[in-house]
Image (tube, rainbow, N blue to C red):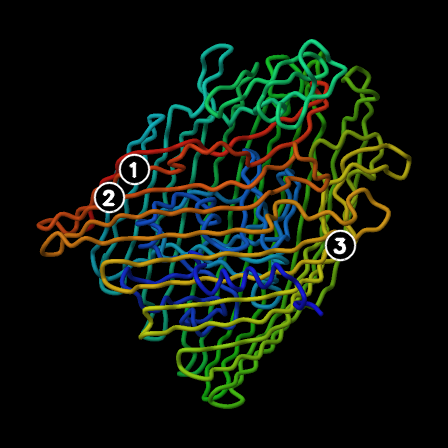
Amino acid sequence: MIFGGRRSWVVMAAMASTALSAQAAFAQDGGGDIVVTALKRDQSIQDVPVAVSAISGEQLKTAGFQNLQDIASRVPSLQVQDNGIVARFSMRGINLNSISDASESPIQVVFDGTAMGSSSNFSGTLFDIDRIEVLRGPQGTLYGRNATGGLVSISSKRPTDTFEGYASAQYGNFDRRVFEGAVGGALAEGVRFRASVKSDTDHGLQRNLVDGSKWWKSDMYAARVQLGFDLSDRGGLLLRAYGTETDGIGPGYGLFGNRVPGSLATTCSIADTVAGNCVTQRGIAGTNKVTRFISGNRPLAMHRSGWGGSAELNWELNDAIKLFSLTSYDGLKKSRREDADGSTEAGNTIGSGNDYKQFSQELRLQGKGDALNWTAGLFYFWSKAHVTSDFGFFPAPQGDLGYSNVRTKSFAAFADGTYALSPQINLTLGGRFTHEKKRHDGLNLAPIVIPFVTPKVTVPFDFSAKNDVFTWRAVLDYHPSDAVMTYASVSTGFKAPGFQTQYIFSTDPFAAAASKKEEVTTYEIGLKSSWLEKALTFNAAAYYSDYRGLQQVLTVPTPIGVNTPVLTNVKKAELYGLEADLRAVPSEYFDLTAGGAYLHSEIKDPGTAFDGHVVSAAPKYTFSLTGRAHLPLGGEGKATFQASYRWQSRTYFNLTQTKLQGFGSYGLLDLRMIVRPPQLPNLSFEVFTNNALNKKYWVHAFGSGAIGGGTVAIWGQPRMYGLKATINF
């Protein structure tokens, strides 16, 4: 049986019945439905037969969310690991472990309807947001760009006819300064605008003990402008343009040796290694017992600039059918350098760059009748990434590794419809046909031996991949009452072949060849319910995923016998789990949001070293709890006291699953107080601290042969605290 006979299921079900995730929530503090567009039409989240989490813009502000990592900490089964190069998403155990800038994530990120094709092509900063929706499970019908695991959809606030806006200023430790604001309203009859800006700067979270310089710092500036036009009483046009610019120095790696000082032939215990008491095989001492101090020989300069624009047309062809068109163009330039050995020696230093562009066009028709709601459309996507990389290996100088060009063309046709079989039962069927072509060409300047010496071997390569794939879903939902809905679904998704584009290290051109596609079929049952006039909401979902052809970067022999990291496929993984969330508003003075998830994952690839292992970036248990107390101050004044706690069990960062390339269970506590003065309801003041207990934890780790054994790791953020003032007008 898929779901039977497992003690863990019983434990999690009992936990779910009492308290479980900051999933989905309410549009206002006091309760009420939140409207989502998970099925490309406006619906109450309680009526959508999909595992979806949603957070309103107001909730983003009151919770103090600043980036996508904050969102991930409150959504069941979602993980975000930012190693300073490429953000890696994991949902229900589906993820990609590649740091290549041209990699495409199996968790699709969508900004204002535009699918981001590259893991590098989005800024994690959040500002002037209307809502965020997180869809879990394969999105192979209405959404079809590489969404085997799920989708994160971010929608900014749209222009309104009413003049409105806000401005906020935040100051905190490490001299962090965050300024944010927006203003919008009518410019003329039928014309409206909205302009939004944000800056986020600091002086660095780490100090380099070698020269006193500050690391792990950034200067980020972002802006977005929107213009809306009423073309007639049938529809309108919305134009968007945005730009972001980030400069800084990335986080320094902590170095954890694995040999006893004075006896390099003796291996340290795991406890001593993690404590930073050991040295590497070359006698280099562990340098990072705490998050704030590192020892490095080379600043980790980084730069990222992104820009783009879109044109969105909404038109009512008649009372029953609507036309939607979205045309988007986006670009990115990025460079990054890191001292990957975590030591003062000129050991392993690497650099990367990405010049990326993409264009997409979506046309969609939507119809609504007495018994049938349907959507049909066409989608076209084009992108090009020019990726460079270089590498320095002690004691040799830095050297180019060449370049890669990855070109993608994708076309899809899709249809999805929901038919009311009865007043209480609905059937949804959907399908999507995708035709996709990819080409990877470039030049690898491979060394004959390590360390780098001359001469280098020039290795040109040129590979292509083509796929024609049909994905589909079927959902049956049942409403025994207005307050309860259950559903059962089967959905499929695929992710097109990919390429290893950086740090190829091979004299064999096949190291740059395409992987095979990955595919997933997910079976899911779910419950959505609200009680006591919506004062209590409880949602839950259980799923089983047959995950085949996992795309992972693994060191394998190429056809001529050269061992090198390549993007290849793992045969299969079995994934199943349970997610649940609870929202309670017992009175106007208190509300509680809690949630949890259980995930079982197992690699099934006989004959390999990782057969039977769990997948990476996928903790078995996660749990979150947020409580808020509201104290009236007279008039419209109010003080809100908020405490949030999130916990996860052990996580591994790759498939080898050594304890030094993972991190044990840990929890983080955030505290926040928001005060709205009685006579100034449009003004608010906040005091906050994130990671209040200053928990030390890793967000990424890997073995470093460059310094002769040991582990290097990137820390999570230390305790962050500050003050914030906001005025709304």
Front residue of 716/496: it is 716
Q: Position of residue 129 (x, y in %)?
A: 36, 52
What residue is drawn where x is 61% and y is 62%?
138
Q: Is residue 374 left or right of residue 258?
A: left
Q: Position of residue 296 (x, y in %)?
A: 56, 16
Q: How many marks?
A: 3
What residue is drawn where x is 46% and y is 84%?
480
Instruction: Single out the mark in the foreground, 1 or 3.
Output: 3
Q: Name the amino acid type tagged 1.
A: Phe
What residue is drawn where x is 39% and y is 56%?
239
Label 1, residues with CA under 10 Å away: few <14, some 14-19, many ≥20: some
Q: Are the residues at dot 1 and dot 3 in contact (C-beta closer than 8 Å)?
A: no
Distance Cα–Cα, label 3 vs label 2: 48 Å
- Image quadrant in which you'd find residue 275: top right
Q: Name the amino acid type tagged 3.
A: Gly
Sequence order check: which comes first, mark 3 or mark 2? Answer: 2
Sequence order check: which comes first, mark 1 or mark 3? Answer: 1
* Residue under label 2: 167
Label 2, residues with CA under 10 Å away: few <14, some 14-19, many ≥20: some
- Image quadrant in which you'd find residue 466: bottom right
Q: Quadrant of the N terminus?
A: bottom right
Distance Cα–Cα, label 2 vs label 1: 8 Å
* Residue under label 3: 549
* Residue under label 1: 179
Q: Are the residues at dot 2 and dot 1 in contact (C-beta closer than 8 Å)?
A: yes
Q: Secondary structure at mark 2?
A: strand
Distance Cα–Cα, label 1 vs label 3: 45 Å
